[in-house]
Image (tube, helix red, strand yellow):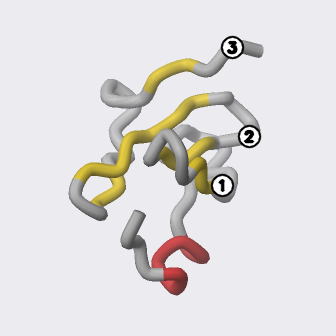
Amino acid sequence: MGIDPALLAILACPDTHHSPLTVDVEASELVCPTCRRAFPVRDGIPVLLLDEARQLPA
């Protein structure tokens, strides 16, 4: 996905729990395991807006 590993280490969900994000390379998304939201990565830039995230099935 082209995201710097140092940046990935500090990225967190923008929701109130601020959980660390995991990478889904196939979907080009960062996933929050707490709230099950998937944040898109566009041109190597994570879009960490709650309105842009999609809810993953439980």
Q: Residue at x 54, y 39 (%)?
A: 15
State how far apart marks 1 and 3 are (Cα): 16 Å
Q: Residue at x 22, y 58 (%)?
A: 43
Residue 22 marker: 1
Considering the image in quadrants, where does the C terminus appear?
top right
Q: Residue 22: image x %, image y %?
A: 65, 55
Q: What residue occupies the far front of the structure in this picture?
A: 26
In primary-sequence order, the first of circles 2 and 3 is: 2
In primary-sequence order, the first of circles 1 and 3 is: 1
State how far apart marks 2 and 1 are (Cα): 7 Å
Amino acid, disc 2: Pro
Residue hosting label 3: 57
Question: In the rendered view, would you say 58 is above or below 31?
Answer: above
- Confirm or deny contact between disc 2 and disc 1 (CB under 8 A): yes
Residue 33 marker: 2
Amino acid, disc 3: Pro
- Confirm or deny contact between disc 1 and disc 3 (CB under 8 A): no
For label 1, the SS is strand
Q: What residue occupies the far bottom of the structure in this picture?
A: 6
Amino acid, disc 1: Thr
